[in-house]
Image: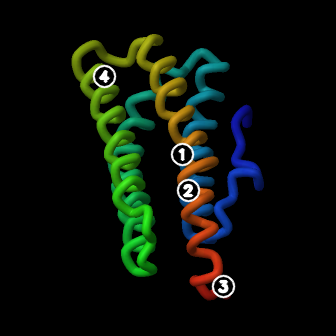
């Protein structure tokens, strides 16, 4: 796979890291498909997956923030809403124009860059807050 989750992206909270790994696996599948000339065939599946999965993932993160009294919850929620808005914009492009190469490129560039940046800054900060508060198995 050309894209892989690495330990440098770990927030130190198992449930969050596992969900992030799934996001990376799906984006990796899209990038691999692009290298094989099948990106346009995979884009609709990725956007459909993200539409449901990010709601689930963001809800999980926000529940942890709420349960443990995370002081940065409002700004973190705002970040999540920003991603959802970007995703909706890309889905509208898919509905209007179909699975174009431009849409594939935009999806990888916009969403993947956002996810990496978000994990490396906002989620790492959340993980540092949660780690001492969450009992590990």
Residue 55 in the image: x percent, y percent?
Answer: 34, 55
Q: Nearer the viewer, mark 4 or mark 2?
A: 2
Q: Secondary structure at mark 2?
A: helix
Whole-Å distance between the Cαs marked 1 and 3?
A: 24 Å
**Residue at numbered disc 2:** 123
Residue at the farthest right position = 7
The 10 Å Cα crowd at callout 4, few under 14, some 14 to 19, many 20 or more, is some
**Residue at position x 36%, y 63% from top?**
59
Write down the residue under mark 4: 94
From what the image shows, is residue 7 above or below residue 42?
below
Q: Earlier in the sequence, mark 1 or mark 3?
A: 1
Q: CA distance from mark 2 to mark 1?
A: 6 Å
Front-most of 126 and 29? 126
Q: Is 1 placed above or below 35 here?
A: below
Q: Nearer the viewer, residue 75 or 48?
A: 75
**Nearest to N terminus: mark 3 or mark 4:** 4
Where is residue 56 shown, x and y percent of the image?
Answer: 37, 60
Q: Is residue 76 left or right of residue 12?
A: left
Q: Return the residue nearer the eye: 46 or 63.
A: 63
**Of label 4 and label 2, which has the lower sequence position?**
4
Q: Which residue is mark 3?
A: 136
The residue carrying mark 1 is 118
Residue drawn where x is 24% and y is 23% of the image: 95
- Placement of the N terminus among the 4 image quadrants: top right
């Amino acid at each position: 796979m050309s894209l892989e989750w690495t330990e440098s992206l770990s927030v130190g909270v198992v449930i969050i890291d596992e969900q992030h790994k799934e996001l990376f696996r799906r984006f990796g599948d899209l990038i691999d498909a692009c290298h094989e000339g099948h990106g346009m065939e995979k884009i609709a599946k990725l956007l459909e997956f993200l539409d449901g999965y990010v709601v689930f993932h963001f809800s999980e993160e926000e529940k942890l923030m709420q349960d443990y009294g995370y002081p940065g919850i409002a700004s973190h929620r705002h970040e999540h809403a920003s991603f959802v808005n970007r995703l909706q914009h890309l889905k509208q492009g898919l509905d209007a124009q179909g699975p174009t190469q431009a849409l594939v490129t935009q999806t990888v560039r916009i969403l993947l860059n956002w996810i990496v940046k978000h994990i490396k800054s906002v989620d790492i900060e959340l993980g540092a807050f949660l780690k001492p508060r969450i009992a590990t198995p």
